[in-house]
Amino acid sequence: MMTLVQSLVSCALLCISLAQAQTPVMSPAAAQVTLGQRATFSCNIGVKDGGAVWWYSQIPGEGAKVILYHHHSYTDPKYGSGVSSDHFTATVDSAGTGYQFIIKKAEIDDSVHHYCVKWYTSINAYVFSQPSKLTVTGANYPEPEIVLFSPQPEVASGSIQPTLTCHISNLSVPFGTVNWLVDRKMVQGAVTGEPARDLGSNTFSMSSYLTMADIKRDSQVTCQIQQDGSTSITARSIKLSECS
């Protein structure tokens, strides 16, 4: 006879199994398109039922935005507030389980994370797919601004491990790669935060921190950023011996 513990374990395993089976799958995991090009995401929901499928976009660190929702019974998708059918659309296959989310002509603002979301009655919950990251290339981004903060003079002189701060602003997209170089050689170990939207604008800022125990006082330290979708690299450098 099954004990209470065994029953609870069996129930938990069943719930986990159902949750795993009832998960929308968004693909590709990452995509790159040229400015003005069509971008397409596929979402397989695994089950045909009465619930709609939602398309969300999200800038890291901000709330998700509803782009549209669609269902096999709809003639056309229905759109979120302020979203234009001239820019976005969606289709569903004859099985009612495969959806395509389409950006007709990709813009820089589409360089965000995209998700499909489905309500599953079997687990009584909304389930998000894994994110699909879109990068739109081909735009002439304004050059970001970099301010490289040197450590305090007593730190730079060697009494304490120096930590350098690189603050980057005026980013056009919320994705970018920050690298640090010491005497023109790339180094590891930096801690870089997520980009955040600048107050009152459509640009983004981020900061990165580098702490090194064995850095020489006459070393040149460089912080550089490459925005996703851009071929340009912007860099700033300082020499610790000049910190005062």
Image (cartoon, helix red, strand yellow):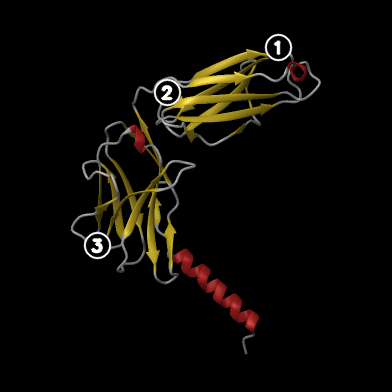
* Distance from Cα at disc 3 to Cα at disc 2: 41 Å
**Mark 1 nearby-residue class (10 Å; few <14, some 14–19, many ≥20):** few
Residue 231 shows which numbered tag?
A: 2
Tag 1: residue type? Ser
Tag 2: residue type? Thr
Residue 99 shows which numbered tag?
A: none
On the image, which quarter does residue 99 sit in? bottom left
In the displayed structure, would residue 125 be above or below residue 105?
A: below
Circle 1 or circle 2, nearest the eye:
1
Name the residue: 63% across, 29% down. Answer: 209
Counting from the top left corner in percent of width and height, residue 60 is at 47, 41
Tag 3: residue type? His
Q: Is mark 1 on a helix, strand or loop?
A: loop
Counting from the top left corner in percent of width and height, residue 25 is at 40, 56
Q: Please tell me which of labels 3 and 2 falls first in the chain.
A: 3
Q: What element carries label 3?
A: loop
Task: Provide the residue designation for mark 1.
Answer: 244
Task: Provide the residue designation for mark 3.
Answer: 72
